[in-house]
Each structure stands twice: as structure tokens, then as C-alpha cells.
Image (tube, coloured by chain):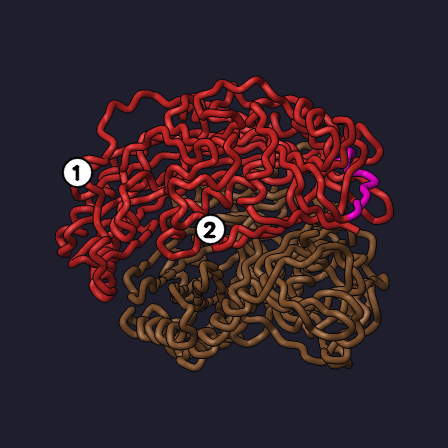
Chain colours: A red, B brown
Amino acid sequence: MTERDKDIARVAMELAIKNGCSGSRITMSVNTQSSFSVRNDKLDRLMQANSSSLYIQLFTDGRYSSFSTNRTEEKELKQFISKAVDITRLVSPDKNRLLPKQEYYFKGEERDLGQYDNSIKSIDPSEKSLIAHKCAAEIFNTDKRIISVNCEYGDIDEYLYIIDSQGFEGTSKQTNFTLSAECSVKGSGDSRPEGWWYESSLFFDKLIKEGVGNRAFKRAASRLNPKKLRSGLYNMVLENTVSSRMVAPIISALNGAAIQQNNSFLRGKLGERLFSPYFQLFDTPHLYGANGSRYFDGEGIATKPMNIIENGVVKSYYINTYYSGKLDMPVTIEGPSVPSCKYSESVNTINVSRSLEDILKKCDKGILVTGFNGGNSNSSTGDFSFGVQGFYFEKGEIIHPIKEMNITGNIITLWNNIIEIGTDPRESSRWLIPTLAFESVNFSGI
Amino acid sequence: MMTQTQTLMSLFGVTTEDLNRLINIALSKGGSYADLYFEHSIANEISLRDGEVNSAGSHIDYGMGIRVLYGDQTGYAYTEITTMEEMERAAKVASQIASSSVGGSRVSNIAVSTLYEYTKKGGYYPVINQWEDVSVSHKIPFLKEMNAIIFESDSRVSKVMGRISDSNTKILFYNSQGVMATDIRPMFSIVATCIMESEGRVENGSTSRSYRAGFEYLTMEMVREISKDVVSKTSFQFEAIQPKGGEMAVVMGAGSSGILLHEAIGHAFEADFNRQNTSIFADKLGKKICSEDISVVDDGTIPFNRGSLNIDDEGVPSQKTYMVKNGILTSYLHDRISASYYKTEPTGNGRRESFRYMPLPRMRATYMENGSQSEEDIISSVKRGIFADNFSNGQVQIGAGDFTFFVKSGYMIENGKLTQPVKDINIIGNGPEALSDIVAVADNFRIDNATWSCGKEQYCAVSCGMPSVLVRKLTVGGVQ
């Protein structure tokens, strides 16, 4: 981000105040991204671009609206903000539309959180292309069952600059590097099952660049000759690549907007034990090198470590300034940064290491879910139903892949049936959710 | 008076000479084809919560993308600043696809038979009152009325959320074959969400309408219709349960059941997957894939429909494309790349979310044509199964063919009668098997005009439709 970008944000702030706003928050987002995709043995797509967006939140006469534009020449900005203020004056006043109390702002020293790799600007495009080519070459033409291989290297360099009319000023920057592979193999009949794998890292040198293609092929080949099982109650083990899917409905239900709009199965449950006493869900926003670590949220409010679910008890909602006023509850934070979970008698207990293999053995038999196929959950009730793919296992060993099966139930019931939480979250994930195991899950098949 | 092309060239600050210069730079490394896509979009929204319209917004997005093809390989770059300096830089980046290619053979020029300049006023979506001329104060009464109707309809209503969003997108397209095309695309959506509480239970429901049309298309009658609809849907949830799951017959109700086509077969007919041999239908062109009573269409020409386009995002005129005609797979959905590969004409399915994305084969309005049976007869023919008529989302695995869709509400069918209301269940099946398992098609076809969006790598507005059909066997999610 250049000084010019910051000046644009400052100009927008001045224009908002000049046009009569009592408050304003301006967020400037700038990013540069590139990607190189290889299909089989040749470069299929290359893409490179720079983007910037100016987000403008206006508070005037007790009213609020939000705007954005990427037309930032001063003349156009003047017209845009003048019109934006006029629009804001037409909506109904809402006494809770306020900038945060200043005591909540992040004011500390911005100690490095390990989010940015300065080398990103010096990586040659030919090196990026070569990484994608090597990934595809790991498997292309190595097995007659392979139909198609797609590998992509991508990187992004992002900056964020937030200022508000109460004097808050914050900057953050992050890099991200990814390498992904998809492989299609010939199955029975017309079927062409696919397998995928990806690695990502905030640092180029830490990006795992070998084995990604091989893992995609192995996952595709492992899906050959699937069988549909009889409907019934099974142990369910969720691989760490997809386990966050079963945490997401809880996170959504903790959101202040859902709570205030009576559209959350966790409304009115603060302080209640709803889940297994061994279930601990917490947020670690200052974890060095974790994807999502941050010192402040989109309002400038300082993040802090939080226990979300402690011994099965709902301890915190995600409450921003607006919903704090609406719900008459204290501000926490607008949403999760780096959520994680563990299975223990106390959130402070250090877990014994548990891998996927350990958990499969402990469960003895059941279904290992490695992917989801559609489905949804009801935010008001917590009822869910998802399509799944994965493997039937016995004695801790994979027996065969499954096909065309659903899981159905209720999120609260499910998390009371948690029997194991691993210690193996994927470090590259934004949410550090490890392998999970539940008992008595409804699977629908034959 | 300026033509639409001249007006848009002025908006983007370019001349024909500029466009040709950019094309020349884009092809300077040996690319076989290049195109330029300029886009200016203004999107607005207002939201109602707790009885008041207390939030509004407006968003401008502006920029252009340059695509270079070298055979079927793609170089792409975009810029948000349309100075020649920035656009030339982007053109040079995109041109590198030709110079950095390894083993890429050069193929023949992309097949497009006609030069096309869109001049017909409005085309499939003529507008009387442009959204950009409509004040927020003229939109607010619609949400206020919605709020009042919903609260008056049922004493269990505790919350109502409403939103009106509109956009107007101006597009200028130019390519190395000399095709110049323009389009101005309106869109609006109105969404109602209702929360009801009764005896400690809370349920929600949501409904929407969306059209490519101007402000004149939004009426109080539409507001009354969706208000009634959302109350009915939410109220229904109190009676419904998650049923016992397993394999059973499924009757898909008319309208939004078109999601079955979109997920089960539509994606698998998109020609990029077939060109890459990864679709389960890759070897089926010209072959019988289902009952001869079934014809499936992807149509970009329905007036005011959310999925309609005058031209696609590659400058190709929109059309009505039969994917399945009387049970035979007759056409994939093509962009220019796949059309070249299959040596056919593009079908107008080259679409993108915005100038930030390269175009891909995408659906528009996908539907099945009418059959001859009545819905009542179809239901009465089922001994045990599910009738599903309200859906929220779906997904497909292209290669395996397994697709799903989420049922917000429906009924059990027992001995030919609708019995226990059901809700919140996922249904899963296999595309080719499900298609061949459609054993009855009703005569009650209708398009569903909800806010459907498709998320294949990037978001595109689509719609779907269907007469009621009977699928012999699908796996229904449920409890024991």
C-alpha cells in the first residue's frame, strides 16, 4: 500500500465530515494476486492483477449506511460521497449505529504476528509456473487410470488500512501462497472420481511444494468402487481437511446479528451447558504465524484470546458495537480470528497427541468423512443435513469408499456425542480445527 | 445522437484505435485470439430490520479484463484503471501465455460466424425506469409494506428482515476478430425473511424474487405475494419433521425443483468439463441418456429472467440451447474455447462474475419442458416417498456425478397421499442415474424467479424451472 492509497482514505474521511457526517470509518483494501494453472503437461491459465477498494461507512444524524467504490479520483470521490451522505439521510435513524467506544480500540504496539513475507515481490513468474508444472508432473502419465491433472500455484499480497473519525488508525498486511492439485481417474462405468489436495502458507519458503500432486492422485484412486451403506447410526470421524464444517454452524449461531434477530439456536444460552463437558472451543487471535491472526477487527476493536465454549458451556457471543447496543450486552469482537478446539476436562489441559490413525483405532468402526457434498443447517434450530463422501472403516482400518450418503441431525445433539478431538489441525487453515469423532450419527444410504 | 457503443467507449475513455492497439499488444507474443471486456457496475441495497429501513448502501465497480488465448491456453489480466498505460501493462501480462507455454500447439481461430453489435433497445430486458434514477425514498415503502403484511398475517411472527438490491451493469466487449458488442444489464432482487416463535420453538423462512428489469417491475402486488409466501413457508416449519432417511421415490414439485437439473446434469453438460474429459457425460454427446419424454433447455432469452443475457461475456448473442432433446444429449454449453475444441458455434454460455474473472461455460435459465401427466396422478402413483417443493442450495461432483440439493420443506408420500410435512433434509443422487430414473413428467412447468446464484469458481446469476417429476429413487437424508 502506498502513501497515495492512504491519502485517498484520508480524503474520503474529510469529504464525509465536510458533507455533514458526524462519524465515518474508511477502509482501504489493496491487493496484488497471481496464479499459474497447469493442465496435464502444459500451462492452461495464467492470471495477474492488482485491485483496490475503498469502503466508506457513514454515520450521520443517528443514521448509518455503507458504500464502496474503486473509482478514487478526487473529483469522482467528491460526487460519490456527497451522494452517499444524501442516501444515508433517507434511512431511518437508529440510536445504536455508533462508532466504537474508544476504550475498546487497539492501541498497542503492533508486534509482528508472522503474517507477511517480504519475498513475495521478488518471486519470478517463471518460478511460480515451474512449481505448478512440477506438481502436475508428479502424477501426469504415471498411471493409466489418470484422465486429467490440474495444478495451480497462487499467491496474494494484501494490505488493509482503516481510519475512523474518532482517530483510530490501523494497518495490516498479509501474504498467502497456495499450491493445489485436482486429479480425475477412470472409475467404473462412466464415473470419473476426483481427488484434490492443497497446501498453503503465509510464507513462500514454508509452502509445501512436493507431494501435492501425489496426494491428489491417491485420494482420487482411493475413491474407486464406492459402496452405499445401509442407513443407520454410525461413529463418524471427520478428517481435519473438512472438520470445520461442523464447527461453522456454532460460530454462525454465536454471531450478534443472529442472536438479535432471534435466528440462532444459541440465543439466550449464554452461561448454559449445552454441549459435551469435554468440548472446549476458543479463539487465539495473536498466535504467531497463524492464518487469521490479527490485533483488531473491522471496527478497530482490539482482539483478545477468548473462550467460546468452555466445558460445554456457552461463554461468549460475537458482539460488535451495533449489536452491543441492540442487545444491551458488552462488546466482544465482531467474529472469529483463529478458532480452535480440543477435547479435555478443562480448556487449560494440555492434550495428549491424537492423530487421525489414533482416532480411527479408538472408534474401531464407523465412517471417515473426507468431503462434503452440499447440505445445509437451520440457523434457528440447529438441525442439519449434509451429503458426505469418505470411507467405511473397521478395526481402525479403511475398508472401502462410500457413495451417495447423507448425515442428518442437530448440532447440539451432535456435539454432545463428541468422543474425540484430535491434535492435528492443518496449520495452513484459517480455523485450526483438528480431526473430530462423534458417535451415533445418522447416516442415510440404502 | 451517440450510439450505445459510442456512449460506452466514452464512459471507458477509449477509442477504436486504442482497442486495436491493446489487441495488438495482447497478441504480440503469438497468441491466437484476444478479447477486451470493459465493465462498469453500480449496485445499491436497502435493508429493513426491526420494522425500520435503517441501512442503505451503494457500490461502484469499474475496470477491464484482457484475455489472450494460445490454443486453449488462457492468459488473463485486469485493471481497475483504464488509462492506456495501465491497460497496455495488463495486455503485456496476458500476452505471456503464448511465450511461456510449454508444448502448446496453436489451434485454428475461434469459431464465431458473425460480427455482432448489439443495438436493439433493451433486448430481453427493456427498462423504463433506470435503477440509478430511483431514490431510496421510493424503495422504502415496499419494505415497510412487506413488514406490515407479514406481522399482520400471523401472531407468531417475532422478526422480519427485508432487502431490496438493484444493479445496473454496462459492458463493452471487443475482440481480435473485430467483434464489438455492448450490453446494459439491470437486475433487482427483493428478499423477505421471517422468524416465528411459538411455545419455545423458533423457526425461520425466507423467500425472494429477482429479475433483470427496471424499477417499474417491482410492484406492491409482488410484495404481497412474497409476504404471503414467506409466512406460509415459516408457519409450515412448525408442523414439519426430519423424516426417516434412506432410498425412496422423490416427487420434485414444479418450479424450484429445477435445481435438480442445474446440479444433476447442467454442470456436467458445461463443455469445459467435457473438453477436459472430467465430466461423467464426456462420452455421451448424441446418445440417449433418458426417457424420450424429456427435453432440457438452457435459455438466455426469457424476457426479464435473472439468467437472461442479450450477449454473453464473450460478445456472443444469447440463445435457447437444447441440451437434451427427446432424451438425446444434443449439445454441451459452450464458451469460445470449447466451441473451438468441438468445432462448433459457441452457445452464448461464456460468462463471468465480473471483469476480474475470465469467462467459463456457465448456465443461464435451465429448465425441463412440460410432460403430459398431472402432478396429482404422479403423487398418487407413489406408495412411499417424498414430495419436495422448496429448496435452498445444491452441489455436484462433476466426475463422480453425485449431486445433492437441500430441501427446506416438503411432505412424506404414503400410499399416494401427501402426509407428514418434512423439512431440512439433504437429498443425494447420481446425475446419469437420476436422469434415467425420471419416470414421469407433469404438465405444470414453471420457472422459479428466486435469487439463484451459481458458484462455479465465481458467482453468476442463474434461474431454473421444472414441471413436477417423479424420480424413481434418490437417497433422502433423515433420522432413524
Pick whichever, B455 or A236, lies toward us: A236
Binning the other alpha carbons within 10 Å of mark 2 as few (below 14), some (14 to 19) or many (20 upward) gives many
Q: Secondary structure at mark 1?
A: loop
Residue corresponding to mark 2: A265
The first of marks 2 and 1 along the sequence is: 1
Residue corresponding to mark 1: A167
Pick whichever, B316 or B408, lies toward us: B408
Residue plotted at (73% across, 75% down): B417
Q: Is residue A317 left or right of residue B414?
A: left
Which range of residues does the magenta coloring cover? A220-230
Binning the other alpha carbons within 10 Å of mark 1 as few (below 14), some (14 to 19) or many (20 upward) gives few
Residue plotted at (81% across, 32% down): A399
- The answer to whether residue A397 is magenta is no
Disc 2 residue type (three-letter): Phe
Q: Position of residue A331 (x, y in %)?
A: 28, 41
Of marks 2 and 1, the one in the foreground: 2
| Callout count | 2
Q: Quadrant of residue B97?
A: top right
Spatial distance from mark 2 to mark 1, Cα to Cα?
A: 38 Å
Residue plotted at (77% across, 60% down): B248
Q: Quadrant of residue B352?
A: bottom right
From where the camera sits, is residue B335 visible?
A: no
Q: Position of residue B85 (x, y in %)?
A: 38, 43
Which chain letter matches label 1? A
Which chain letter matches label 2? A
